Image (tube, rainbow, N blue to C red):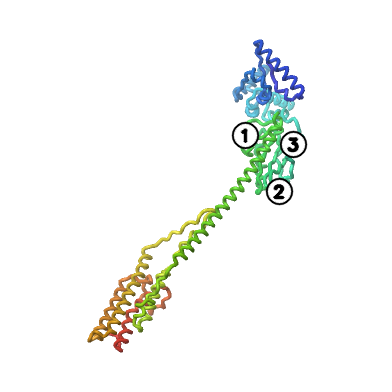
Amino acid sequence: MLDEVDKIVEWTALDRALFLNAFEMLVNRYVNQGGLLIFCVRPDLWGSLPASLHERVLPLWLDSWERPATEELIKQHLLRSGRRPLSEPCAPFSDPAVAQIVTLSDGVPRQILRICEGAWDHAALGHSSKIDVEAVHEAIRTTHEKRPMGEAARRLERVLAGDQWWHNVPPRDLGDLPGPPGSGEPRWIEVTRTAWIVLLPVRSLLTRAGIAGIADFLGHARDAAAGYSIEMLVVVNGHACRQMRRQVADVTGTMPLVLDDPRFDTALRSGVQSLAGRLRASQDNTVLEKMSNRLDVLQGQQQTLLERVDSIDRTLDNPRVVSSPPMADRSGERVPVPVRAHFREAQEALDRLLEEGEGPRISLVPVARTAAGRPPRPRRLLVDDSALRNMGAVVLARRLLEAFREAIVGWWETDAAGSDPEPAGRDQGELFAICRGFEISMESLPRLDRGAADPLSGPPAPATEPGERAQDLLAHLADRVLRELGEAFSEGPAPLR
């Protein structure tokens, strides 16, 4: 049985090659002669051994030990050393110290024993009768932190210089940004003018405070350089268990690298290349998103312009023909001269009211845009019953005015022909009937001014609105026509009503 075969990674290349050749010959001899050879090796080192060994060796993967198995291992070693446990099963190791050993060792028996041995030595040097969490942390630092931060920085520079990743001056406003306690100097790598990678060397990750310091540093860097994209790669100059690595990955988005890892150089190059590609892809996506949003806005503006051009084309192809006032047609010329101006004023007032209407002017202009690229919201016209009633009243008043004018023209032309032997009395009575019919018909329609003035409130005010003016002209039209035509025809006053 061979233990600690992974120590060969610390040997020179020549010594390691000589050992592997002799070891392969030993394995072949045991296999050929029916012997059993058991050796312990780390998974990463096992993957680097020659393929011929893989063909003749059966690997067994052990599960990580949990708290019960760890306590049993510590207890057995304490019993073998001749020290009987006291009230606690793993005394002199405190309960929090055992919990830290379980977490920081990743459940690997060899790591458990190594941490326990280092913690025991640290407590003995301090003449302490109890091994606490601080002793466990100090044992891990003594075992794994074999090089100062300056040496770690030089190794980073040596590895990255081969791929032309140079140490750059930090981005603006980040030169004086302090790193986490105990960390080395951050190394800034410029990927583009607005994209950076920061390599942060730190000591062994043993507590949540160390993770919080990394998160604070990255958060302050991103806040201070809001216009930049920053990715972080943490390099641990010491020990980092699986749980601590996952916590670092949660706050930075990248898995930390351990300087003692035999494949550290390759992992560092690959990590920097991956982060650089991520930053470039993110910037490309940002540019594409901005272009897409801008194109959506331009498309919306273009669609609006096309709709307006189409509207202009339709207007030119189908011009809006405004109906000529009734006074301009042939029947308007036949209206008796004394009342022609009255009919024209009333007709113009109704035309204006029909065109402009009462109240605010109707508009179908779309509601203002809510967001870039979104089409404008259509405006919905809400028409209540009163508006429909008023519009109908205007149309009916206009038709009633046309009928009144046609009746007056017929009465006037008949009178001019002189066919009746007694035209004066008959014709004036007929004129009275026509005017009275128009007057009572107007009274049956809704008022055009949306309300009536109080007759007891004094003399009416001058009409200013289109509805008021039209209502005033139509209300007095019958009286004026009766009076002026009666005087013009008989050269006397009109018949009493």
Per the image, the residue denoted by label 3 is 162
Q: Is residue 213 visible?
A: no
Front-most of 26 and 39?
Answer: 26
- Extreme bottom residue here? 491
The residue indicated by pointer 2 is 173
Q: Quadrant of residue 41?
A: top right
Q: Is residue 430 above or below residue 239?
A: below
Nearest the eye: 77 or 283? 283
The residue that mark 1 highlights is 246
User: Of the residues under marks 2 and 3, which one precedes in the sequence?
Assistant: 3
Residue 309 rendering spot, x and y as whole percentages: 50, 61
Q: Separation of disc 1 and disc 3 at Cα?
A: 29 Å
Task: Quarter of the image for the N terminus: give it.
Answer: top right
How many numbered circles does the render carry? Answer: 3
Type of amino acid at the residue the image marks with label 1? Arg
Name the image quarter holding residue 451: bottom left
Q: Position of residue 260 (x, y in %)?
A: 71, 30
Disc 1 or disc 3, which is closer to the eye? 3
The amino acid pointed to by label 2 is Asp
From the viewer's side, name the closer residue of 256 and 332. Answer: 332
The answer to whether mark 1 and mark 2 are in CB contact below 8 A is no
What is the quadrant of the C terminus in the image?
Answer: bottom left
- N-terminal-most mark, 1 or 3: 3
Q: Tag 1: Cα neighbours inside 10 Å, few (<14), some, or many (≥20)?
A: some
